[in-house]
Amino acid sequence: MVVLGPDPRRARSQENFFRRKARRKCLAPRYPHHRCQPVDGNTAIVGGPGDYNAAGDVIVGSAWVFTRSGGVWSQQGPKLVGTGAVGGASGEIEQGWRVSLSRDGNTAIVGGNLDNNSVGAAWVYTRSGGVWSQQGPKLVGTAAVGPAEQG
């Protein structure tokens, strides 16, 4: 066991120390966009709101899921890009602006704040057998007034 942290009397394993540190960093108010979220310690999601589409002409955004096995982090499957996105005047959607994982690491939600002229939306994914799949259409709340930037 490696002892880390400001108080050596409170022994913590290296893994738990860094997991808590990452959680604090990702969820702290100075990181308002929540672009990374380690949850179960072995699954993490990272948003990339500036990722371009395949043609390279529109900022669609996306998210990537990583899993840890034997201390090594690897990308799990292809990047997540939700269907049904609608670009605004600039075409930008910015999926991955905000990302979150369920506590067990098997459900992810990916927000795209600029979808449909900044109304915004969120896409839900679940993991089964190591494969991530979008669950239903994008989520958009009703009765928003102006550029709500949901997601």
Image: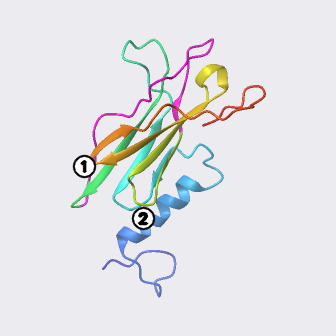
Locate residue 146: give its quadrant. top right
Residue 112 visible (yes or no): no
Within 10 angstroms of label 1, few (less than 14), some, or many (20 or more) residues? Answer: few
Would you say residue 114 is visible in this rendering?
A: yes
Q: Where in the figure is residue 118, as x and y percent of width and height?
A: 66, 24
The residue that label 1 is drawn on is 129
Q: Position of residue 79 (x, y in %)?
A: 35, 34
Q: Is residue 86 magenta?
A: yes
Q: Secondary structure at mark 2?
A: helix
Q: Quadrant of residue 83?
A: top left
On screen, residue 47 versus residue 30, left or right, reads left
Mark 1: which amino acid?
Gly
Q: CA distance from mark 1 to mark 2?
A: 27 Å
Position of residue 36 relative to residue 49, above or below, is below
Specify the label residue 19 is tagged with: none
Q: Position of residue 87 (x, y in %)?
A: 56, 17
